[in-house]
């Protein structure tokens, strides 16, 4: 039997549709637009070799706050967008072109999910707004009791908005039946 003496962390994601009023859609779109502009500004003004979130933050945080009049949590969201894109480009040996207003990253300090009423709050340009999460039983079972690390707000065609919840789990390798029986016969 394989004896695992280390934990393997696995990132999990589940996508859910949001119920968004036409007025809230305008606010989301405005937020996505400003975040894309801020992300492009960051990408243009910070050396392309800076790919870590903290390295980018040190170089440009205050300038982005002043240039776009954004609250700190949304500046951090724009920085996270750039850092993630640069890290992906580095790993795939490609490069980052530009950022478009179709998604935004939210860390656990700028969104919250409530299981009891299936709603979530997002920090947008004019403050926090709460949205109904349209969620199925399978999705809810996956989310139940998880400590969510981040979420990605995604705008799809025809003004549909989705939230992708992200969390980390510990993966335990499966043990085959033969290994279990061999283990129990030897030690049981």
Image (cartoon, rainbow, N blue to C red):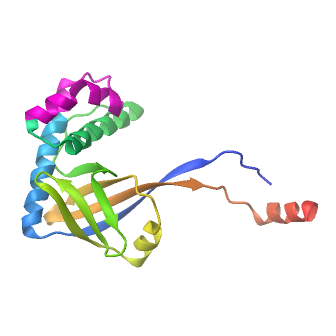
Q: Residue at x 23, y 51 (%)?
A: 103
Q: Residue at x 62, y 48 (%)?
A: 7
Please say whether residue 120 is one of the residues in the magenta stretch: no
- The magenta stretch is 41-67
Q: Main secondary structure of the magenta part?
A: helix
Q: As drawn, is 89 to the left or to the right of 174? A: left
Q: As drawn, is 178 to the left or to the right of 33? A: right
Q: As drawn, is 127 to the left or to the right of 181? A: left
The answer to whether residue 77 is seen in the rendering is yes
> Which residue is at the far bottom?
137
Above or below 64: residue 150: below
Q: Position of residue 49 (x, y in %)?
A: 32, 22
Q: Position of residue 62 (x, y in %)?
A: 18, 30
Q: As drawn, is 51 to the left or to the right of 129? A: right
The answer to whether residue 51 is seen in the rendering is no
Above or below 95: residue 37: below
Q: Residue at x 9, y 52 (%)?
A: 30
């Amino acid at each position: 039997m394989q004896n695992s003496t280390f934990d393997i962390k696995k990132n999990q994601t589940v996508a859910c549709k949001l119920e968004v009023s036409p007025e809230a859609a305008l606010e989301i779109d405005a937020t996505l637009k400003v975040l894309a502009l801020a992300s492009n500004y960051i990408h243009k003004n910070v050396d392309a070799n800076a790919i870590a979130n903290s390295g980018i933050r040190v170089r440009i945080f205050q300038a982005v706050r002043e240039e776009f009049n954004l609250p700190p949590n949304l500046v951090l969201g724009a920085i996270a967008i750039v850092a993630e894109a640069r890290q992906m480009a580095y790993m795939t040996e490609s490069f980052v072109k530009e950022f478009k207003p179709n998604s935004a990253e939210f860390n656990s300090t700028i969104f919250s999910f409530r299981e009891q009423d299936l709603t979530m709050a997002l920090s947008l340009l004019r403050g926090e707004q709460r949205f109904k999460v349209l969620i199925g039983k399978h999705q809810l079972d996956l989310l139940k009791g998880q400590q969510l690390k981040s979420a990605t707000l995604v705008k799809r065609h025809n003004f549909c908005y989705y939230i992708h919840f992200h969390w980390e789990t510990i993966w335990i390798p499966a043990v085959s039946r033969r290994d279990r029986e061999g283990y129990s016969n030897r030690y049981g």
